[in-house]
Image (cartoon, grey):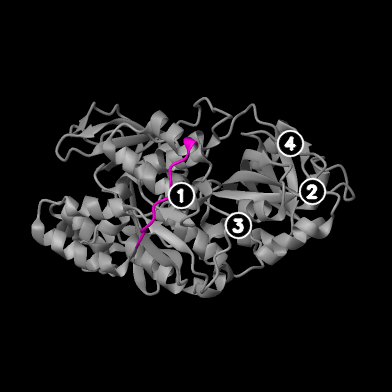
Amino acid sequence: MVKIDEEVGMIGIWLLCACCDIQLKINQQMKVLLDTNIIIHRETPKIVNADIGILFNWLDKLNYKKYIHPLTVEELNRNKDQKTVETFNIKIQSYNQIVNLAPEGELIKHVSLQVDITENDKNDTKLLNEVLCDRVEILISEDKKIHIKAELLGIADRVFKIDQFLEMVVANNPTLVDYKVLSVKKEYFAKVDLQNTFFDSFREDYQGFDKWFNKKADEISYICYSNNMLSAFLYIKTEDEKENYSDIEPAFKPKKRLKIGTFKVTSNGFKIGERFLKIIFDNALQSKVDEIYVTIFERSPEQVRLINLLEEWGFERFGFKKSTGEIVLSKNFDRNQKINLATPKKCFPFISQESKVYIVPIYPEYHTDLFPDSILRNESPMDFIENKPHRNALSKVYISRSHFKLLHSGDIIVFYVTGGKFKGVVTTVGIVENVISNIPNLETFITLCKKRSVFTDDELRKHWNFYPGLKPFVVKFIYSYTFRKRPNLEWLVENQIIKDYESVPRGFAEITRDNFRKIAQYSIGR
């Protein structure tokens, strides 16, 4: 059973297309156009998407002007229930309506001819035209096709899904966020308030949900509270080769599997969904399963978003559940599978035997903030509660001025925490997604690094301007693995992984696969 209000993105997900360089400031009268699907979710008496309340809270907090398109009014008036129409017409009076529509130029007409099929498609393009012509600054929509067209029009950085918008405003307005109220922890089912409205969507989708939940009283869940409100819940379980899968078509072959049983995250800009993905993959590794799977409805925008995210991280459509009609998604977790270096997310957390390996330094003051699972022994876990976007994210960025920058997708990064002979230690493994060099300006640099690095905007400006003749580049990577036992600099030198104490890497230094294997074997006590 799965519901999610955040594109767990993820797990995952790099928001280069969604993070614009618009600096959102309080009292700036930014015009925000809201798609019909946003208005319907906001004004319907039934809570369909819990993200909506958080979205509108931020819009009000930042004093943005909320606009709707005349086509939205027309669409709402086509509802067959006259009472519903009357109710909507009253409620939409609280929005500004665009009066003078922007003329359609050749570019918008060209994209419409390329992509639009139905009348609704054409209407969606008219909403995008208001952004293209700068009549409004941004558009918020959950429609997948709108985002495809925004890419073609070159305005993807101004068209947002709800979760993308929330991530942006959280990153751009840190003084308005109380980070300390949010963290992920384990909890018994029995300690979680089942009557919380958070679980209403499950009750609607799954008959007998409360009874099922109560039977799990002594089992462990992963939960997250935000502002004293339950905002995320995850339950996973391991199944052996004897599990009965007769309700799944086509039938599963006997395998040891990890099932994602219950999964819901409300969007809040903190990437808790990606944090949960890390928990799922870590448990799958620990349990040595061959496959991960989930059953999920494909009815609501939130469920569609989750499906898209899971597919991005290697889940594929397998079949369906006969009793409910849910689709079944599965991810191959065979350690011997062939790794596609071009798409490391698909095979995550596994790495290729063909990848090159590089060791790279990171200063202690940044290390655990970026890698909360790799906390050093002299640090307190309470100082690193996973309550900021860059801590929860699986996809992260590393900023470098190394003269060597020829890393490729699928390459392995081993992070070395600087600190000298005994305190300098290797702690963490990352997998390169891509390298972004020749960054044109400061604004682009900040946009690339925001939410995925440990630095504030001011710190990023200092990085950019520190050496005017040698601008930094960005390595986007996936946070993959934390070494249990960490070899220090003395061990690295003794084992000739680093030549001597004066040869500590200052940038990306390649090491052999054999040396990487030595580190891994040392980590597990071999």
Q: Which amino acid does label 2 sit on?
A: Arg
In the rendered structure, which disc, 3 or 1, sits on the residue that comes first in sequence? Answer: 1
**Was residue 100 drawn as part of the magenta stretch in this picture?**
yes
Residue 217 in view of the camera: no
Horizontal side of residue 182 vs 360, given as left or right? left
Spatial CA distance of label 4 from label 2 is 25 Å
Element under label 3?
loop
Spatial CA distance of label 3 from label 1 is 15 Å
Q: What residue type is labelled 4?
A: Asn
Tag nearer the camera, 3 or 1: 3
Q: What stretch is highlighted in magenta?
A: 97-106
Spatial CA distance of label 1 from label 4 is 33 Å
- Mark sitting on residue 450: 3
In the rendered structure, which disc, 4 or 3, sits on the residue that comes first in sequence? Answer: 3
Spatial CA distance of label 2 from label 3 is 18 Å
- Closer to the camera in the image, 377 or 236: 236
Residue, disc 4: 515
- Mark sitting on residue 401: 2
Image point (27%, 68%), residue name: 93
| Residue 296, horizontal then vertical, whole percent | 27, 43
